Image: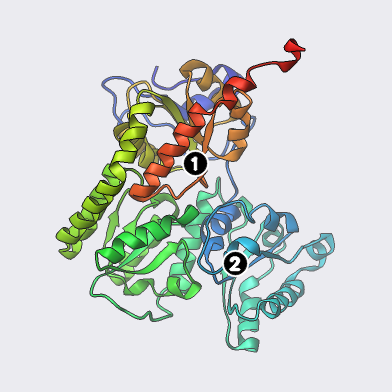
């Protein structure tokens, strides 16, 4: 049967609808795992909350913006310093986060006075920062605080500051995907078009769905600069608050992570007529194809080919060295959503590896359509996977390495299986030609590390 029920799920048979094994002669019009619906009670989900999707993934990346979390301090702590998105502003966004530290008394009597006090204190503590994002959390959403009214009052009082309110509490959706959606739409409706950028090129783009994980944005910016293209805004890697307000001036929206940021690209097309071009920025073949597509849009094909030729000459020999040593190795990709279909063919075509299982925390069914179309016969596809299901996959598939986050990664290490940080990378960047060589190097080092042989020995037996 194409839909699979793991042994661990016999007490929650509803999980069968969320697991699919690709068979010969089947396509996505016949079978798709259920996705983007409530986690089934009894299944220990790896999902993040909706607030996390807004703050940790999108808003918290901005390099010049005070991040103020209106809620208990734990909500701020758990979304601070857990993603590796550096900036050229002395990594300000990695160092600091502010919280209103809501307590029980505020839940009872309200926390709007506390919020205003914290806004003023934050601007005083960071006098060079004139931009702020306020995030509501479960507690402050439930008690009905109105952060927009407070922010309006402060902006009128201070005069030279601008504040955006992201009102997406943790319980607002089934996963962090809801936070992506709410942030995209609210930013589009409230902030885009309120700032005019300096135009320095005849060719302008927005790079959407790129969060500068370990320097990804720097790599992509370099390619576009060499092609003579100005990036108006990165949504949101290494970007400024006002840069995102300028997105209406781009001629093309280049979309990488469609799940977290495709919404704003669609809205920009509706309101300003800016076309959308989806690309893949991981893997040699995919990156080359993406640069060609952007070049063709502007009539800059020769410049694109020049960049591709230069990068291939520099990095392809190194990639081939790793490919010879990684060919045939089995891996699982257990990450968020789009990286499943971005990575599967790149790993197989560029490195000769075999992807045997993929699991998405917050992907929608359209994400599974894409990844299943790119995947191989026999591959296991899981929506909202839990750890016991993962252990069954490992037992069945005998994998060599896993792309996943630190939570699952630390578990599989106990089974003496290496993992690559699929969310924040090990030693990135991973995007672009140089980045894919970095990724190959990390995979090779993980698989061939001597620690796995040593970890299997009980030193007490030699005593």
Give the answer, above or below, for where 141 lies relative to 125.
above
Residue 380: give x, y in percent of width and height: 43, 25
Residue farthest front in this picture: 463
- In the foreground, 141 or 88: 88
At 49% from the left edge and 41% from the top edge, which residue is drawn?
Answer: 422
Give me the disc on residue 422: 1
Q: Spot the residue most to the right.
A: 105
Q: Secondary structure at mark 1?
A: loop
Can you give x and y, in whole percent of width and height, for residue 194 in the image? Answer: 43, 80
Image quadrant assignment for residue 74: bottom right
- Residue 119 location (% of width, % of height): 69, 75
Q: Is residue 453 visible?
A: yes
Q: CA distance from mark 2 to mark 1?
A: 24 Å
- Vertical placement of 350 versus 298: above or below? above
Left-right relation of 37 to 318: right
| Residue 222 falls in image quadrant | bottom left
The image shows residue 42 at horizontal and vertical percentages of 64, 29
Query: For mark 2, what is the residue?
Result: 92
Quadrant in the rendering for residue 363: top left
Where disc 2 sits, the SS reads: helix
Closest to the observer: 226 or 100? 226
Image point (70%, 16%), residue name:
458
Sort mark 1 into few (<14), some (14-19) or many (20+) by Cα contacts within 10 Å.
many
Q: In the shown orientation, is residue 20 left or right of residue 152?
A: left
Q: Mark 2 or mark 1: name the one nearer the start of the chain.
A: 2
Who is closer to the viewer here, 67 or 451? 451
């Amino acid at each position: 049967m194409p839909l699979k029920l793991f042994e661990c799920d016999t007490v929650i048979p509803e999980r069968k609808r969320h697991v699919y094994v690709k068979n010969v002669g089947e396509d996505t019009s016949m079978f798709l795992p259920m996705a983007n619906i409530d986690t089934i009670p009894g299944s220990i989900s790896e999902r993040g909350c909706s607030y996390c999707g807004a703050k940790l993934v999108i808003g918290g990346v901005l390099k010049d913006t005070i991040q103020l979390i209106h809620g208990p301090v734990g909500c701020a702590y758990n979304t601070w310093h857990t993603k590796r998105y550096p900036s050229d502003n002395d990594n300000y966004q990695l160092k600091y986060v502010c919280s209103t530290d809501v307590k029980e008394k505020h839940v009872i009597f309200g926390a709007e006075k506390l919020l205003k006090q914290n806004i003023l204190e934050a601007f005083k503590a960071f006098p060079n920062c004139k931009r702020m994002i306020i995030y509501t959390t479960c507690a402050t959403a439930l008690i009905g605080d109105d952060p927009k009214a407070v922010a309006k009052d402060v902006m009128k009082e201070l005069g030279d500051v601008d504040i955006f309110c992201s009102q997406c509490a943790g319980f607002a959706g089934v996963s962090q995907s809801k936070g992506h959606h709410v942030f995209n739409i609210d930013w589009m409706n409230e902030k885009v078009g309120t700032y005019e950028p300096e135009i320095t090129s005849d060719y302008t783009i927005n790079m959407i769905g790129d969060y500068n994980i370990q320097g990804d944005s720097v790599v992509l910016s370099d390619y576009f600069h060499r092609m003579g293209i100005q990036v108006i805004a990165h949504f949101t890697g290494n970007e400024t608050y006002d840069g995102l307000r300028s997105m209406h001036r781009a001629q093309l929206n280049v979309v990488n992570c469609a799940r977290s940021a495709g919404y704003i690209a669609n809205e920009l097309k509706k309101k300003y007529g800016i076309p959308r071009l989806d690309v893949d920025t991981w893997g040699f073949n995919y990156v080359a194809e993406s640069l060609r597509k952007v070049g063709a849009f502007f009539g800059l094909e020769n410049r694109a080919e020049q960049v591709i030729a230069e990068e291939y000459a520099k990095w392809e020999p190194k990639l081939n060295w790793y490919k010879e040593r990684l060919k045939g190795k089995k891996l699982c990709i257990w990450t968020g959503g789009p990286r499943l279909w971005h990575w599967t063919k790149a790993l197989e075509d560029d490195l000769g590896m075999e992807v045997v299982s993929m699991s998405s925390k917050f992907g929608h069914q359209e994400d599974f359509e894409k990844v299943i179309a790119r995947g191989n016969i026999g591959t296991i596809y899981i929506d909202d996977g839990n750890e016991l299901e993962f252990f069954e996959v490992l037992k069945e598939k005998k994998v060599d390495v896993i792309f996943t986050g630190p939570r699952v990664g630390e578990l599989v290490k106990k089974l003496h299986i290496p993992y690559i940080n699929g969310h924040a990378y090990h030693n990135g960047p991973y995007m672009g030609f140089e980045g894919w060589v970095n990724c190959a190097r990390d995979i090779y080092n993980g698989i061939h590390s001597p620690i796995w042989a040593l970890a299997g020995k009980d030193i007490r037996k030699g005593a």
